[in-house]
């Protein structure tokens, strides 16, 4: 991965963008994308679409939607108590085990403040409490306010929150990265990289390309579906992240995908059966171009892809998945070479006339 | 240096129990010019001495423990993962997903994790995993790890500091290094002739293992005339009863306990009153839960007062303190070591025996 792309990944990862409050990360994506593509639209839902048309458009020219969601898991403040602590609901599928003690940011698109998720100190917990997972309802966010009035000067009920993670090189030679929100932001970075290749002329495509950065991928009414209904793509390539389980205590058969083994191609996910023609095409291309890939046999949710497949008149859908450890935590881990593989494979696919 | 900066700097040092002197060079560099002497004993108690310049002056012990809770490596696993066990009362609920640093040949960044429950059987879905069931991901190969890490290598929380609003600070190791910061800050502002005696600031070892190991031998060697023990005190949160905690922003706490010296405690309260230092009383009837209880019976008995800094989320990597409380504590330490009244009441007559 180039230094420049690493900088972009870092910026995107650290940006605030929980489901329903994607504006801060969307602003960065628009800024980065506008230097690579002159045709950009933001729809009423907040989805961003960058358009590239081929020099020659015929009736047979296909519309290819390349899509990833930009939102991250987070929180919503539902109560500010008399002592200035914030009670919260969870946005997205966060394991309650990774909440306690975490640094968070709380606020909205206008600005955020720092906080920490706290609960009863270990000294006050009963033996029973120490053995069980603390219910998020028994946790609260401490923002250093001492009264409701003081807290309300800085946050409001309905404000959003995210993990306040750090972005660091990880592992031998810095081949990995540990940060928050990598599931979506690594996909965004890979798409921007391919847009860069189109903009520099290093990549040309005979298709009508639509690069879509969508809202509400973690939960709620999916933004990708809205875009698909509008674009009516013939083909869609959806980027996502898949849980790598090459971990102690997990049998080889259950490991799904592994870090550093390349971009993953799922034939099927919980909500969708992908187009066999496209998964085969991706595998063949990867082999001929020597791009590392692995087949992901353990179904993930596949929410975005399923929405895109069904909306409008329907589309052939392929997913490219970046392996990731510890998804939906403040400290996810990915391998940079896997992101490069996803971006290389996406570029190879878009150059393919038969896509 | 401002008090806030002292707290940030000391908190960032690695001092997991048993490795209290891991960054003693940095500590000595930071405190350069404030003290006359630095000693370290076999247990890794670190003693900073500030002399008053008078012969036969009382020896005043100010104790704050310097060790912080942490982990030790217990196994190096296939694939570059580490198993760990706790040292001190770690809050297991906050471990999964936490960033840590493994202090091997070089510091290594790690993330605490466990296999997803859907892959290990859904039955343990709601169970909190024990520390032995978790592992640390390092991103290194097993062989590379074996070259850098050994069984017993210490692991600490990732040093990170956050301002919460204008008055609150969040970070790791405030228990008890924020108190050490208050004491050093207080002493840095005092001239020798202001001191009521020779001040022995002991950054003691092995407190978090609940054996209060360092205080016995450290205090035995110093043979103080009287002492102040400073440790953090559980701050009020919405899920605690008022009598279990002290108020955040209520000032330094002074402990009323059968286990500490009644007279010295009363004099410390009067001192805070007369100097208008914000303080709050806190009752710990039979034991302070701090080094004070262990220090009282050292040698022929050391008159001890126990004071505290209110702290929320104790034993996590985001312990929270209020800056005003820390300022009060720092002022209280300064008042204590300069109090001629207390020195007159508790200083022993004649030449002191020198044991170290």
Image (cartoon, coloured by chain):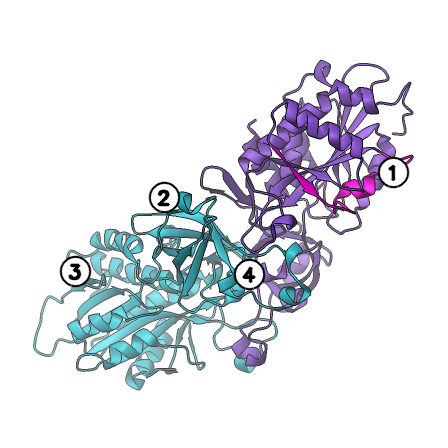
C-alpha distance separating marks 2 and 4: 42 Å
Callout 3: SS: strand
Callout 1: SS: loop
Q: Residue B355 vs residue A74: left or right?
A: right
Q: Nearer the viewer, mark 1 or mark 2?
A: 2
Chain to which the residue tagged by mark 2 belongs: A
Query: Any idea which chain is the cyan one in this picture?
Result: A
Image quadrant occupied by the C terminus of chain B: top right
* Vertical relation: A298 (above or below) A201: below
Q: Given contact means CB atoms under 8 Å apart, are the residues at marks 1 and 2 in contact?
A: no
Residue at screen point 53% across, 53% down: B238
Q: Which residues are magenta?
A: B279-302
Q: Nearer the viewer, mark 3 or mark 1?
A: 1
Residue A153, label in figure: 2
Residue at screen point 31% across, 55% down: A25
Are the residues under marks 3 and 1 on the same chain? Answer: no
Q: Which residue is mark 4?
A: B139
Q: Which residue is mark 1?
A: B298
Residue A323 vs residue B51, the one in the foreground: B51
Q: Quadrant of residue B35?
A: top right
Chain to which the residue tagged by mark 1 belongs: B
- Residue A138 pos. (x, y %): 52, 61
Q: Quadrant of residue B341?
A: top right
- Residue A296 pos. (x, y %): 43, 79
Q: Would residue B344 be seen by someone viewing this image from the given angle?
A: yes
Callout 4: SS: loop
Q: Given contact means CB atoms under 8 Å apart, are the residues at marks 3 and 2 in contact?
A: no
Residue A41, label in figure: 3
Query: Any idea which chain is the purple one in this picture?
Result: B
């Amino acid at each position: 991965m180039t230094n420049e792309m690493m900088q972009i990944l870092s910026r995107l990862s650290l940006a605030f963008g929980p489901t329903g409050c994607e504006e801060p990360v969307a602003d960065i994506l628009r800024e980065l994308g506008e230097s690579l593509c002159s045709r950009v639209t933001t729809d009423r839902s907040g989805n961003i679409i960058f358009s590239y048309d081929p020099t020659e458009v015929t009736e047979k020219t296909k519309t290819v939607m390349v899509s990833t969601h930009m939102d991250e898991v987070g929180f919503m403040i539902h109560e500010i108590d008399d002592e200035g602590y914030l009670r919260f609901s969870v946005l997205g599928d966060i394991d309650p085990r990774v909440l306690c003690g975490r640094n968070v940011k709380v606020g909205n698109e206008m600005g955020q403040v720092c906080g920490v998720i706290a609960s009863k100190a270990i000294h006050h917990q009963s033996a029973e409490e120490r053995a069980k997972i603390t219910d998020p309802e028994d946790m609260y966010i401490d923002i250093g306010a001492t009264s409701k009035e003081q807290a309300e000067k800085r946050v409001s009920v309905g404000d959003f929150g995210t993990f306040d993670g750090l972005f660091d090189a990880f592992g031998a030679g810095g081949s990995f990265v540990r940060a928050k929100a990598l599931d979506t932001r690594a996909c965004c970075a890979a798409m921007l990289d391919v847009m860069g290749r189109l903009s520099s002329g290093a990549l040309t495509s005979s298709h009508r390309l639509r690069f879509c950065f969508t809202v509400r991928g973690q939960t709620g009414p999916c933004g990708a579906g809205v875009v698909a209904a509008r674009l009516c793509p013939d083909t869609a390539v959806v980027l996502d992240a898949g849980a790598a389980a090459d971990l102690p205590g997990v049998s080889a058969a259950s490991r799904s995908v592994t870090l550093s083994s390349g971009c993953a191609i799922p034939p099927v996910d919980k909500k969708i059966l992908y187009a066999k023609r496209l998964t085969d095409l991706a595998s063949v291309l990867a082999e001929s171009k020597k791009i590392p890939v692995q087949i992901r046999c353990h179904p993930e949710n596949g929410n975005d892809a399923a929405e895109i497949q069904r909306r409008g008149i329907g589309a052939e859908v392929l997913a490219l998945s970046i392996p990731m450890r510890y998804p939906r935590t403040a400290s996810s881990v990915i391998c940079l070479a896997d992101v490069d593989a996803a971006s290389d494979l996406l570029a190879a696919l878009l150059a393919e006339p038969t896509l | 240096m401002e008090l806030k900066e002292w707290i940030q700097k000391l908190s960032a040092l690695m001092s997991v129990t048993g490795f209290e002197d891991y960054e003693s060079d940095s500590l000595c560099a930071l405190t350069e010019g404030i003290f006359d002497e630095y000693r370290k004993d076999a247990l890794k108690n670190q003693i900073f001495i500030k002399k008053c310049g008078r012969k036969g002056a009382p020896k005043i012990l100010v104790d704050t423990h310097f060790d912080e809770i942490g982990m030790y490596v217990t196994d190096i696993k296939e694939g570059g993962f580490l198993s760990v066990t706790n040292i001190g009362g770690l809050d297991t609920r906050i471990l999964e997903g936490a960033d840590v640093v493994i202090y091997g040949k070089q510091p290594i960044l790690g993330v605490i994790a466990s296999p997803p429950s859907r892959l290990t059987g859904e039955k343990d879905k709601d169970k909190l995993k024990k520390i032995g069931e978790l592992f640390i991901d390092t991103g290194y190969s097993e062989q590379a790890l074996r070259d850098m890490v050994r069984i017993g290598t210490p692991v600490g929380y990732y040093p990170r500091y956050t301002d919460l609003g204008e008055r609150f600070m969040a970070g790791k190791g405030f228990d008890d290094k924020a108190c050490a910061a208050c004491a050093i800050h207080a002493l840095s502002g005092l001239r020798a002739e202001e001191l009521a005696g020779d001040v022995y600031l002991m950054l003691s070892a092995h407190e978090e293992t609940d054996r209060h190991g360092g205080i016995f031998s450290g205090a035995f060697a110093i043979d103080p005339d009287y002492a102040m023990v400073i440790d953090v005190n559980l701050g009020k949160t919405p899920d605690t009863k008022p009598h279990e905690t002290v108020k955040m922003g209520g000032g330094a706490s002074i402990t009323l306990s059968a286990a500490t010296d009644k007279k010295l405690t009363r004099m410390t309260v009067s001192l805070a009153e007369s100097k208008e230092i914000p303080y709050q009383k806190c009752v710990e009837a039979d034991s302070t839960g701090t080094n004070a209880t262990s220090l009282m019976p050292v040698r022929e008995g050391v008159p001890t007062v126990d004071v505290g800094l209110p702290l929320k989320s104790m034993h996590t990597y985001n312990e929270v303190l209020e800056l005003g409380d820390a300022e009060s504590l720092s002022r209280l330490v300064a008042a204590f070591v300069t109090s001629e009244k207390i020195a007159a009441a508790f200083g022993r007559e004649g030449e002191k025996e020198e044991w170290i």
